[in-house]
Structures are given as C-alpha cells and as structure tokens.
Image (cartoon, helix red, strand yellow):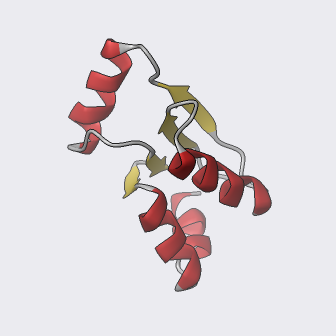
Amino acid sequence: MPEVVIYTTRFCPYCIRAKHLLKHKGIEFKEIAVDNNRHLRQEMTKKAGRTSVPQIWIGKRHIGGCDDLYHLESTGELDGVLAEAS
C-alpha cells in the first residue's frame, strides 16, 4: 500500500469527510494537523500550491482536496491511483 498523507485541521468538515472515505476503504494514512502550526501550514502550501485543507497525497502524487478525492472515488479511479503508487 502506498503512503497516503493528508494535511488537516481538527474541525474542518472536508478533512473529516476525506478521512472517513479513506478509513471506509481501509486505507491507512499519515495525518499532519496544521492547526496553530504556521510552519506545517507553510510546508503544505509550498508543496500543494494551495492554502486550503485537506491536502492529500498518494505516494508522490498530489490528489488535491476532499472534492478531488471523492471525484476519483466516484469515477472509479481512486483504486487505480492507489495501485499505481504501490
């Protein structure tokens, strides 16, 4: 299984939804909480080119946010992305 990394904040509903989908699919992930941590948020922004959370990576591929993750799932592409990154 590839490394899945998700940058989150504690009360973000989109972060909660994204984590729910990953858990539902049995996908283990590393969560990096950027609440009140300016350095981690800057790291995320530099890597993703976006300031919003969540920001999700599967392997080295930047997936984007919650809507992007759900889009991959709804089109049946998420399993393929996971397989490619393994």
In depth, the one of 5 and 40 nearer the eye is 40
Which residue is found at the position 50% from the left and 31% from the top?
9
Which residue is found at the position 72% from the left and 45% from the top?
28
Q: Is residue 26 above or below residue 6?
A: below
Question: Is 42 positioned to the left or the right of 55 in the image?
Answer: left
Image quadrant occupied by the C terminus: bottom right
In depth, the one of 63 and 3 nearer the eye is 63
Question: Is 66 positioned to the left or the right of 18 in the image?
Answer: left
Q: How many numbered marks appear?
A: 0
Which residue is found at the position 37% from the left and 20% from the top?
40
Whole-percent x and y of residue 11? 57, 35
Which residue is found at the position 26% from the left and 23% from the top?
42
Q: Is residue 15 above or below residue 25?
A: above
Q: Residue furthest bottom?
A: 75
Whole-percent x and y of residue 73? 58, 75
Q: Is residue 24 above or below residue 47?
A: below
Whole-percent x and y of residue 26? 79, 57
Q: Is residue 7 above or below residue 61?
A: above
Question: Is 62 positioned to the left or the right of 75 in the image?
Answer: left
